[in-house]
Image (tube, rainbow, N blue to C red):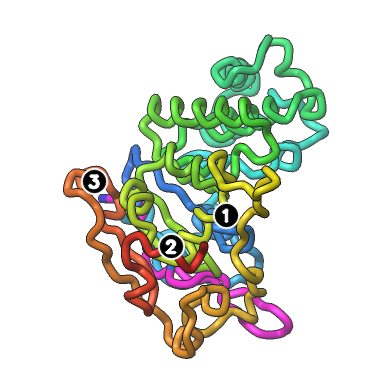
Amino acid sequence: MPLLEVTGLNLFLRSSGRSVQALRHISFKLERGGALGLIGESGSGKSLTAMTLMGLQPQQASVTGSLQWEGQELLGSTERQWQALRGNRMAMVFQEPMTALNPVHTIGRQVAEPMVRHLGLAPREALKAATGLLERVGIPEPSVRVHDYPHQFSGGQRQRITIAMALACQPDLLIADEPTTALDVTVQQQILDLINDLVAERDMALILISHDLGVISQNVDDMLVMYGGQIVESGPTAAIFRHMAHPYTRGLMAARPRLDAARQPSGQPYALFTIAGNVPALPDLPRGCTFAGRCPFTEARCFEERPQRVGIPSFQPQEAEYSSLGVHQVRCLRPEAMRPGNTEAWQ
């Protein structure tokens, strides 16, 4: 039985007096010990998906579909039932550590709070355990600094503190939402190595949200590419990087800075590639393919006909043995757009 199984998850929000669909038919499975990546532009629905998995969707939002935790349906749970899970069985490392931490409480109190609430530890005992967690995530002099406040720490240290908070109750699922945002490259790698070590050490499942294809390629077994609140491509990470089938996925790859990129005759680099247009507002998303209009393969039916997920036979048999998703799938109406090596539209 999967640790987490999401089937046909939809989320509707009120906008300008009408209901708009913010998440569209999200489906995936995650096994204990598995690592799943979510990637896409800002506004693609990654963080909203994560918040919905935690029962933290916006007020007045309407959620349909199925969200099962170890076979138990979570949609329709009371707030008390959600609170028993959050911070205990499932935890989240939020995108911006300065806003995730309360500026008027010491970090020791904040790391200890989940253990007092969920594990029933006495405050003194929880503070001792919090000191040990801070040491584990690399905070120097933890017995002293446990009494300091968030503003007394660097950005990388604050991110380590939020990881310690998330791990306080040894959750089964850790959701890391852009855990390396605004950190320099050296600290980014330290944070990712720390998360991977802790996940392996405790046999946790991991959902890693990132804009960076390089981060995803090196840290997760499976990945979901999201656009317009929908999964447009999914499957084993190795399979997708070997054959990026959806035009949007290839566009993301083409937009990455490259050290070996061609240069102008003057020696200056060419302008960085960008995908044409912008992510439309939710009320303006096409009825059919969410990427219609920005995709170089767009034709009239793309705006009206919703593409179904189709399998791409590009993964090796051994990959299916460890993949929770099992098969490489893509949503596209144009078979010629999905063929291997089809990158000319982004040149």
- Looking at this view, is 258 or 216 the one in front? 258
Q: Which residue is mark 2?
A: 343
> Residue 99 colored magenta?
no
> Which element type, helix, strand or loop, lies under badge 3?
helix
Disc 3/disc 2 C-alpha distance (Å): 25 Å
Q: Which residue is mark 3?
A: 319
Marked residue nearer the N-terminal end (2 or 1): 1
Residue 3 seen in the figure = no
Which amino acid, mark 3? Glu
Q: Which residue is mark 1?
A: 255
- Looking at this view, is 103 or 260 the one in front? 260
Marked residue nearer the N-terminal end (3 or 2): 3
Query: What residue is at 38 percent from the left and 28 percent from the top?
Result: 200
Query: What residue is at 59 percent from the left and 64 percent from the top?
Result: 275
Residue 203 seen in the figure = yes
- Looking at this view, is 171 or 210 the one in front? 210
Task: Tell me if mark 3 has few (under 14), some (14-19) or many (20+) residues whose alpha carbon lies within 10 angstroms of its own.
Answer: some
Query: What residue is at 36 percent from the left and 66 percent from the top?
Result: 330
Query: x%, y% of residue 37?
Result: 45, 48
Whether label 2 touches label 1, CB < 8 Å: no
> Which element type, helix, strand or loop, lies under badge 1?
loop
> Residue 19 colored magenta?
yes
Which amino acid, mark 1? Ala
Query: x%, y% of residue 74?
Result: 43, 59
Q: Which residues are magenta?
A: 2-25
Disc 1/disc 3 C-alpha distance (Å): 27 Å
